[in-house]
Amino acid sequence: MINVGVLGATGAVGQRFVQLLASHPWFNLQTLTASERSAGKNYRDAVNWRLDEPFPDSVGDIVVSKTDVDSVKGLDIVFSALPADLATNLETDISRAGVAVCSNASSHRMDKNVPLVVPEVNPDHLGLIDLQRDSGNDGFIVTNPNCSTITMVSALNPIQHRGLSDIRVATMQAISGAGFEGISAMSIYDNVIPYIGSEEKKMEAETLKIMGSFDGSVITNAPFSISASCHRVPVIDGHTMAIWVDTKASVEELKNDFRNYKAPFTGLPTQPEKSVLLFEQEDRPQPRLDRNRGRGMTVSVGRIREGVRFIAMGHNTIRGAAGASVLNAELIVSKKYL
Ligand SMILES: NC(=O)C1=CN([C@@H]2O[C@H](COP(=O)(O)OP(=O)(O)OC[C@H]3O[C@@H](n4cnc5c(N)ncnc54)[C@H](OP(=O)(O)O)[C@@H]3O)[C@@H](O)[C@H]2O)C=CC1
Ligand SMILES: N[C@@H](CC(=O)OP(=O)(O)O)C(=O)O
């Protein structure tokens, strides 16, 4: 078994990590950290469990640790669900202490030697781990993208080989993306908020890195332009987006690409049967009906029309956050980086 911990284990993403790791077949969840407010309490007393899934009793007696390097030294992997300002230095320090960090936080995503990975899209970018290890330290940082970015690149991946240019996207993002205390009911009920801080820049920059090519030493950005407009809507979980792409391929060719798409690997425990699912019905996908497909790991697409325009939707705290990080860790193990 591989010994793992979760940083920020009491938060919205942290609870998803705990749910996914409590009975994971490869990973032994040993350490849970949070703020000084929670440290020293049993996890069951520290956490306000807010997921639909039942609280995993097997981890209830773990005593929550402070979030520092000493608390996680000796673990094989830590999963980070920390606020980005805290993650910046701490993730670096933890990796320098010899621990592999699989992070959800945005702090290191665009660092030159840090892989920003969606396993189905750019597994080869894990090669950057070797460059991080050039300094003689076994630890490293691997990141997963922003939740909207993950949904979009997962949906573009099956059709990227057609040659894409001038990508435009308009998102409709769930409120769980802002964290448990992130947005008040008075702000979002009966409303749409046409602004999510830094989200558009992240979608644009991260997509070009992930869909770019890696030659063993540097990543060259993907050769298309991308323009994003991001909006918060009153949905609990599941980010939906309308995507426009310029391509010479026909609608029927693109539908066949989605129908025939297979992930480039098998056998990872968190991998869904279908990473991308094409809906033929004209009113799907919908977040309430489709976000839990593939245990929250399937990205659903539909309404592919001339233009070319289509809809994509993914569970933002599973496929878009904790599940993405756990799948990255499984890929890291399967590729023998650990
Ligand atoms: N991939 C993606 O797109 C997504 C990424 N995220 C990212 O994941 C991270 C966590 O987000 P989310 O779960 O929504 O946030 P929450 O606010 O729900 O949780 C924050 C967590 O961090 C802990 N924490 C807060 N302050 C401190 C501190 N000073 N020292 C130590 N621990 C602290 C909290 O502990 P306590 O309970 O004790 O206060 C809690 O466990 C963020 O970086 C966010 O941007 C989020 C959603 C999707
Ligand atoms: N900003 C995203 C969630 C998030 O935290 O993104 P990031 O991991 O890029 O900070 C949302 O609100 O839906």
Image (cartoon, rainbow, N blue to C red):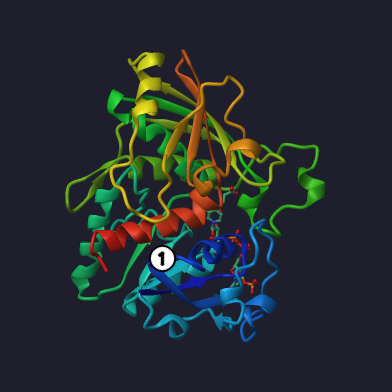
Q: Which residue is mark 1?
A: 25
Identify which residue, 172 or 291, lies in the foreground: 291
Ligand 1 lies under 8 Å from the Cβ of mark 1: no
Query: Quadrant of the rendered structure where residue 246 is?
Result: top left
Residue 141 in the figure: left or right of residue 290: left
**Residue 66 showing in the rendered view:** yes
x and y percentages locating residue 298 in the rendered image:
48, 42
* Nearer to the camera, 216 or 319: 319
Q: Quadrant of ligand 1?
A: bottom right
Q: Residues within 10 Å of mark 1 (few under 14, many from 20)?
A: few
Q: In the rendered view, does 163 fall on the left or right side of 189? A: left
| Residue 334 picture location, percent across and down | 27, 59
Q: Residue at x 50, y 71 (%)?
A: 6
Report whether residue 34 is seen. no
Q: Position of residue 35 (x, y in %)?
A: 61, 77
Asked which quadrant contains residue 212, the reply is top left
Quadrant the N terminus occupies: bottom left
How many numbered marks are there?
1
Left or right: where 215 falls relative to 39: left
Residue sitting at x 56%, y 52%: 317
The amino acid beneath tag 1 is: Pro
Say which element carries label 1. loop
Instruction: Please say if 249 is above or below 290.
Output: above
Quadrant containing the C terminus in the rendered view: bottom left
* Residue in the picture at 60% in, 82% down: 61
Image: 282 above or below 77: above
Examine the image and state in which quarter residue 3 appears.
bottom left
x and y, in percent, of residue 27 in the image:
40, 69
